[in-house]
Amino acid sequence: MKHGAGRYARLDGGRQVSDAREASHAREAVRHGAPGQAERAQAGRQEGEWARPAGSQQAVQAQIGQERTERRRAPAGRSRTGAGALGIIAANPGAIEPLAGGLIRALAEEGVAVDCFAPFGAGGEARALRQLGARVHQVPLQGRGFEPGAQVRSLALLARLLRAGGLGTLLGLELEGAVYAGLAGRMIGARRVVALIDRVLLEMGAGARRGFMARVRNQTLRRLYRLALARSHAAIFYNADDTEALARAGILPRQLAVHVVGGAGIDLARVRELPLPDIAEGLAFLMAAPLERAKGVATYFEAARLVAARGARARWRLYGPDGSEGDAIAREALAAFGSPVEMLAPQMGLAEALAQAHVVVLPAHAPGTDDVALQALAVARPLIVSDVRGLREAVDEGVNGHLVPAGDPRALARAMAQVLKRPDLIAAMAAASRRKAERLYDIRLANRLACEALGLGLGLGPGHGLGQTADQCAA
């Protein structure tokens, strides 16, 4: 259903003036800050799903009424306003639990209200967030194709819900969520707005694509990053390389408070070190990733073929779902490589696949933090990964694994052969991986840094890991 901007005044008769002002602010923000429809259509989808606006005016009115009622009835021990309440905004609802699930659980246990705003669909994302202790709100963030009219409606609705809930501290997830948080935060006069950028999508350097579409995509992304970061008080990044890349591109505001943390974190109290399997049947390499060229699947298959051709006694395995991106590789096509790689059943589960491996291989071509790398560190597995942003941070060369150039099967083959020559070092490398996880990737560290960036100032106990400084978290 289409919603005209002028109809917002009728959603709540007591707020006609401010509603009209919010719609006006939204139109102004869209006109000056965001890319147009044609440019966005050329650039293509960047992160998440740009959901089509959904829901009725009656549903929105009911949400706003519920917000005000619960704000008045909030128990004394559960903060609903100001510095003690957090609003999380995401254009991709599937990103909330992976990026902020641990933070939501920790805050909810301390009685801090957490409200999540996203275009929730029929999936289980909303239910999972409620189980963590958050309240969820269906908000039509982003019209498909980045329609300006949809932007106005989405921003105005979001601002109304945030204002009705008394939320002055906002966390925007991923690039699109950060844009919305920044714009809506300015509209309502938010106390604190923080952008969480898990990966920077700009293509820079020698490996950047040079075609017309690549240039359009990069121009669009530059505008979005500037828009998101210029309206944020602080930003959380998952690796220092991303902050340096944005600074070199002139996108990172000088006054922005920057926090670097090693991903969303792993609950090391639950994820225990796994014993290495018996090496009698041969050393086992594991790649865990979707079947996509960008993940380096073809590189892994070719490197395994090269090593096996030398008579090495080893096993190579691939665990992951079918690819969903444009560069997906069909399972049948992989047989043409003539590689010894064994395809593991998807129903096996990552934990079981890791338990059967000695070394984890992640030869991705594109930058980005990989959760599999963090899981491998947590269960104590050496790593061979591409030397790209978001992956290289997981490896200390020669200590807990090796770095290889992206897209180079011969270099990957040499790294695997190096491990095969010294299997006696695997146990020490495995122990080094676990120590690295404990030092940098514990979920308590991630929660601590997020609270500091958000300015929540909560005295959470040791169980939540608050107490170190941001510098110590990023060390």
Image: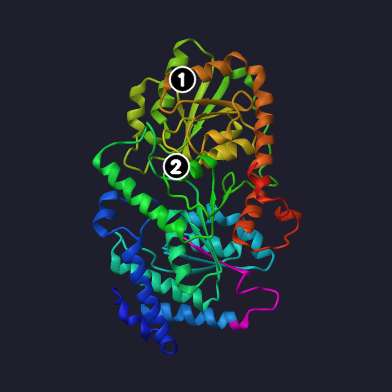
Up-down: is 361 above or below 88?
A: above
At label 1, which amino acid type do we have? Ala
In the rendered image, residue 154, in percent from the top left (x then y), is placed at 38, 69
Picture disc at residue 411: 1
- Whether residue 207 is in magenta: the answer is no
At label 2, which amino acid type do we have? Arg
Picture disc at residue 431: none
Identity of the residue furthest to the bottom in this view: 14
Q: How many residues crowd around disc 1 within 10 Å: few (fewer than 14), some, or many (20 or more)?
A: some
- Location of residue 83 (image quadrant): bottom right
Residue at disc 2, secondary structure = helix
Residue at disc 1, secondary structure = helix
The residue shown at (63%, 20%) is 279
Would you name the residue on which mark 2 appears?
A: 248
**Bounds of the magenta segment:** 72-91
Q: Quadrant of the N terminus?
A: bottom left
Q: Quadrant of the C terminus?
A: top right
